[in-house]
Image: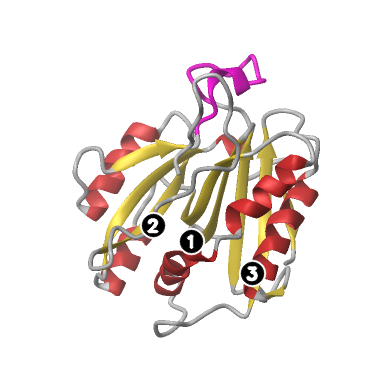
């Protein structure tokens, strides 16, 4: 992904009230139950190519119709780029985000092969949270809150461990960085500030060492207008 607003800091589905925006209130439900688990993943796909990407994902993972969902799409009133049409939002953060779940436990090697075989995805994330955040300084608080719930992290770290071949169960990263791509309006804060807010919250929560170049794990924040998706890179390279 490339964007003039992409910055790096070394360090669920959207809900809306009928007449007002709800900010930073919905996050992913990650575990299905105490006995049956799933690992949620989000494939990042070029806007306009969602249909073939969905068919590819369903074929690779054996998912039923409806098993792949488009998430994090800003409403039309948030689209501040008149040249965009058909719900395609300008900017790197406007990439389409396709969420799906794979059964877990599963054959780890087979799961890695399936993820790596995706040709239509620019990248694959293990999602931490999807939140609607405000413009202005309050948006940075919303972003911090979105990633600060410790209960959201176990399946994310499990997906990271398995898909990046990091070791046995329970393996945790020693270092990380946070990358940010921001588009869609004057947010009132910079991409550096957003990356620092998210990365600072992650460091406070986990105590991992920040590292620009030697990181073991990368947290990615994609902010398109008010819609913030935060996840950990598990396929497709660095952002």
The stretch in magenta equals 73-88
Q: CA gap, disc 1 to disc 2?
A: 7 Å
Q: Residue at x 74, y 49 (%)?
A: 194
Q: Position of residue 111 (x, y in %)?
A: 30, 66
Instruction: Say whether residue 166 is magenta.
Output: no
Q: Is residue 109 left or right of residue 236?
A: left
User: Residue 205 has which mark?
Assistant: 3
The image quarter in which residue 131 lies: top right
Placement of 114 over or under 227, stated as above or below: below
The numbered disc on residue 30 is 2
Query: In the rendering, at what x and y percent does residue 32 appear?
Result: 29, 58
The quarter of the picture where residue 50 lies is top left
Q: Nearer the viewer, residue 117 or 124?
A: 124
Of the pair 162 and 112, the residue shown nearer to us: 162
Question: Regarding mark 3 in the picture, which secondary structure is present there?
Answer: helix
Mainly helix, strand or loop, the magenta region?
A: loop
Residue ID at (64%, 69%): 205
Give above or below for 121 relative to 156.
Answer: above
Badge 2 crowding class, 10 Å Cα cut-off, few under 14, some 14 to 19, many 20 or more, is many
Is any part of residue 239 visible from this angle?
no
Residue at the spot of label 1 = 152
Q: Does the CB distance between marks 1 and 2 fall below 8 Å?
A: yes
């Amino acid at each position: 992904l490339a964007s003039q607003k992409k910055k790096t800091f070394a360090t669920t589905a959207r809900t809306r009230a009928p007449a007002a925006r709800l900010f930073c209130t919905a996050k992913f439900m990650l575990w299905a139950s105490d006995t049956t688990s799933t690992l949620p993943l989000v494939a990042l796909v070029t806007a306009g190519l969602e249909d073939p990407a969905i068919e590819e994902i369903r074929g690779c993972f054996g998912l039923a119709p409806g098993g792949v969902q488009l998430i994090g799409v800003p409403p039309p009133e948030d689209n501040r780029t008149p040249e965009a049409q058909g719900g395609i939002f300008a900017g790197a953060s406007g990439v389409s985000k396709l969420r799906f779940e794979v059964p877990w436990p599963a054959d780890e090697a087979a799961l890695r092969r399936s993820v790596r075989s995706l040709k239509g995805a620019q990248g694959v994330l293990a999602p931490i949270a999807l939140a609607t955040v405000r413009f202005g300084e309050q948006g940075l608080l919303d972003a911090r809150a979105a990633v600060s719930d410790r209960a959201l992290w176990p399946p994310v770290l499990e997906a990271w461990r398995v898909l990046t071949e990091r070791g046995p169960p329970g393996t945790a990263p020693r270092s990380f960085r946070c990358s940010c791509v921001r588009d869609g309006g004057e947010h009132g804060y910079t991409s550096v500030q957003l990356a620092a807010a998210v990365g600072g919250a992650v460091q406070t929560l986990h105590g991992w060492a920040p590292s620009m170049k030697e990181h073991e794990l990368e947290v990615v924040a994609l902010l398109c207008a008010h819609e913030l998706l935060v996840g950990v890179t598990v396929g497709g390279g660095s952002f």
